[in-house]
Amino acid sequence: MRKLELVHFTRSARQLAYSVQIGGLQFSTSIWYDSVDFVDLEATYGSDFMRRIYFHIVAFDINRLVSLRPDTIDFGPFQDLVSPSFSALWHQIFAGVWGQWRYENDLPDYGGPQFVGLSEAEPTAIAVVKTEASPPNLAFCGGGKDSLFALSLLEEAGEAFDSLVYSHSIYGSHAAQHGLIDRLLDHTAVGRRHRVWICDDFLAVPILSLAPELGVRSITAAETPSSAFIALPVAMAHGFQRLVLAHEKSADSGNMEWAVTGETINHQWGKSFAAELLLSTYIEQRLLSNVHYFSLLKPVQDVVIFSALQGLTVALPFAHSCNIEKPWCKRCAKCAYVWLNYAAYLPEDTVMAIFGENLFDVDENLIWFRQLLGLEAHTPFECVGEVEESRLAFALCGTRGYTGRAMALCEQEGEIEKGSLEELFTVATGQHLIPPSLAGKVVPLLEKKAAAGRAYVGAALARS
């Protein structure tokens, strides 16, 4: 039996720190906040309630260690808080996020670790965030084009907002990460910038090669669900009622169907509407009754966002999306996907100023373009759009005269279907969690931008 055990937890005014052990190995994590004082929060909300908040932060942050295939988890000092509702949520998140990991590790029957000492008691106390002196919107900003578009929507809707930015050890220098995002935020109407630093010695080391005896091939972290709970102390300290994300409808689509289990594998499941609904419901019903967790972009596909970037070209060079080497490695699936769509919708000089080279001509990227077009077993395990969106982007690049090995490859494979333009540019007004008072301002803006994108694409294809 392999047990993952939380062996130590501490909190100071601005830091939460914990350590875990599994299979004789020990790992430590510290989470720092620049605008939260936990001593003050305990005085306001009570130490018992804050202990529940700490538990949820640690329990969802710890889940990346599930990549080492534990049979059980012992939450140590928080064991009494492992309630039935928490267990249900945690395992639902596991089932969705770790589908790709189970596929990669050929573990179709692994249902995740069991919890040691599952309590029968269900905590009933919930809190109300006090909202006197802050704008209601705390907007998550990861530095990419989705964040930029979402922040521009809030500004256009006349909604004041602060930002929440977190850095993580896996992405390199914390100072560099915050610096990149600050340069993007400088081009927005952001109010105060709230920052979090996650210092982790598990994802910061090549654990797969250093500990081959663990018998795993890949590492997964449920970063988005974890960030939902990491944000709660910021909401409590400053009175935010809305935790605003920038996850588009395209994230709801899977990469492949796993024949062995019959399930859809979706790399982006943590950003899906299903995950959003689970997390939002749990937070409101179990922790903070007036804090709403939702995505501002959930009604629209990626094509709407890319086409709308035509009006954001001043700020766009300061956005970045690569998870390998920030701002762009230019050799991964994410870089290939963003390049493809920038080339399809933006002026060529803007695209070349950002990337500096034609990524269609890079041999290492050919496999990513094939996957994006649906010519391989599955689309890339990255945050990318649907096959129809990539096919449309290639068609648009063709009308704009782009050349390169990837373009030639597409021609050799035959005609690429463009998909249904009406469907891709339809705003899903009935499938989102945007609060009604905000939706009344934002949804009409999304419909206007979708219509403009549809007109642009139709005109471009008509000229070809």
Image: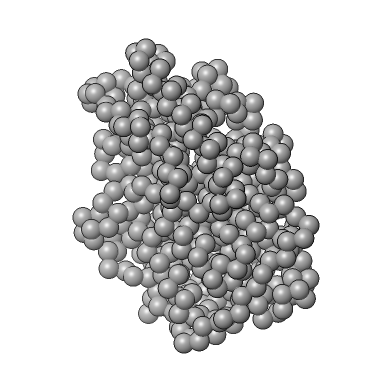
Q: Position of residue 425 (x, y in %)?
A: 41, 34
Q: Which of the 4 quarters of the picture holds residue 151?
A: top right
Q: Is residue 312 depicted above or below 399 in this figure?
A: below
Determine whether, in the image, residue 333 is placed left or right of residue 171. left
**Spot occupied by residue 316 in the image (x, y as percentages of width and height):** 60, 30
Q: Which of the colour schemes (rainbow, by chain, secondary structure, one colour) is used? A: one colour
Could you tell me which quadrant the N terminus lies in? bottom left
In screen coordinates, is 88 left or right of 173? left
- Residue 388, position as x, y percentages in the image: 33, 34
Q: Is residue 151 something one can see in this rendering?
A: no
Q: Is residue 360 above or below residue 92?
A: above
Residue occupying the point 38% across, 35% down: 424
Tell me if residue 136 can be seen.
Answer: yes
Give the quarter of the figure containing the C terminus: top left
Give the vertical position of 454 relative to 244 (above or below). Answer: above
Q: Which residue is at 70% across, 45% downward?
A: 160
Asked whether 329 or 436 is in front, the reply is: 436
- Up the image or down, 264 lies above or below 177; here it is below
Query: Who is closer to the viewer here, 105 or 265?
Result: 265
As rendered, which of 357 and 398 lies closer to the eye?
398
**Which residue is located at x 43 percent, y 64 percent?**
93
- The picture places residue 183, in percent across and down from the top left corner, at 69, 37
Instruction: Report the number of numbered marks.
Output: 0
Identity of the residue drawn at 25% across and 54% down: 258
